[in-house]
Image: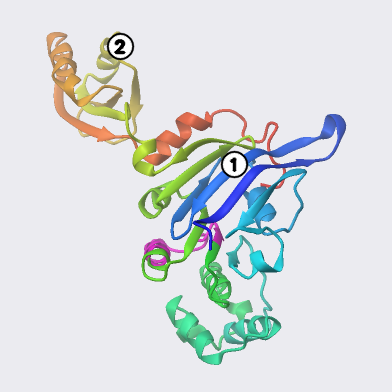
Amino acid sequence: MTDFAIQTKRLSKTFGKGKKAVEAVIDLDLEVQAGQVFGFLGPNGAGKTTTIRLLMDLIRPTHGESFIFGEKAGTRGALQHVGALVEGADFYPFMTGWDNLAVLSRTANDYQPERIENLLTEVGLAEHARKLVGEYSTGMKQRLGLAAALLGDPDLLIFDEPTNGLDPAGIQEMRGFIRDLAERHGKTVFLSSHMLNEVEQVCDQVAIINRGRVIEQGSVAQLLSGDSAYLRVQVDPFESAMDILRERWPVDRDATAAKEGGWVRVTANPEEGPAVIQTLVKAGIRVYQVIHQKRSLEEFFITVTNSDDDPLQNGDPND
């Protein structure tokens, strides 16, 4: 078996023709190593959902190709490797969670009652297995979708917004579950999510797509390396401090509440901390705290995608 769970080569999808044509995915080249948790990020309309549909052969590419463990996407050989949890997965509401999984497994000629019981326990639905799905909460349906994705013991799991509908405890549990799939069971997880804090904690590699193109790819550590630090400084008076610091460094307001004055975010390396303090003190500004902080994946994401722009302009209408 190839080292890559997913490979795409100039994968592209255009919707419509002529002046109304929308290039949803443009010359996408991805390589996802087997056994990794891979985060696929982008603003609304960036092309994430279209890419997932292409990988699962739910839509056909305009040009280019994709492979699952070396098998051309859409072939029986490729699909047998894949389990998917897509946003808004449908189940029969008049049947129990257990019966829904039984129907799916019988359809795939792989009915194993013991495995269904084990999966429902793993995803935290053992106590609700005999409850009608129509009575499930959004989070419970999401858990059932996860169990359904795992039914065939696939090598590759494609998760589209897996934490939707989960409370904070459920999100933390999902994070551990995803890491466990890779580390203990050797699964590959391709994860599309807008929960950037969760992605930062759970993913080995990340790709950021914007307007149909991958603009950044690498490990979280690689993406956040380099000039990615800033200082948070609590000062008083706040506005005067902003004006003074702005003459030498890029500054921004920090929303953190303060009993006295306010917080200024200064784009500066840790070594420049003394110079920042000296500049403020010389100007008669009171300095209460200085905190060195690395940029988060969320801050990096906003910077590289220019998210203040309209993300749907020239973007994917289905994403």
Q: Which of marks 2 and 1 precedes in the sequence? A: 1
Q: Position of residue 157 (x, y in %)?
A: 54, 64
The magenta span reads 158-179
- Which secondary structure, mark 2? helix
Q: Is residue 160 magenta?
A: yes
| 73 to the left or right of 123 | right
Looking at the image, which is closer to me, 64 or 260?
64
Could you tell me the amino acid type at mark 1?
Answer: Asp
Label 2, residues with CA under 10 Å away: few <14, some 14-19, many ≥20: few
Looking at the image, which is closer to me, 159 or 235?
159
- Residue 193 in view, yes or no: no
Give the residue at mark 2: 243
Give the residue at mark 1: 29
Residue in the image at 16% along x and 9% along y: 283
Label annotation for residue 37: none
Label 1, residues with CA under 10 Å away: few <14, some 14-19, many ≥20: some
Q: Is residue 283 above or below residue 90?
A: above
The type of colouring in the image is rainbow
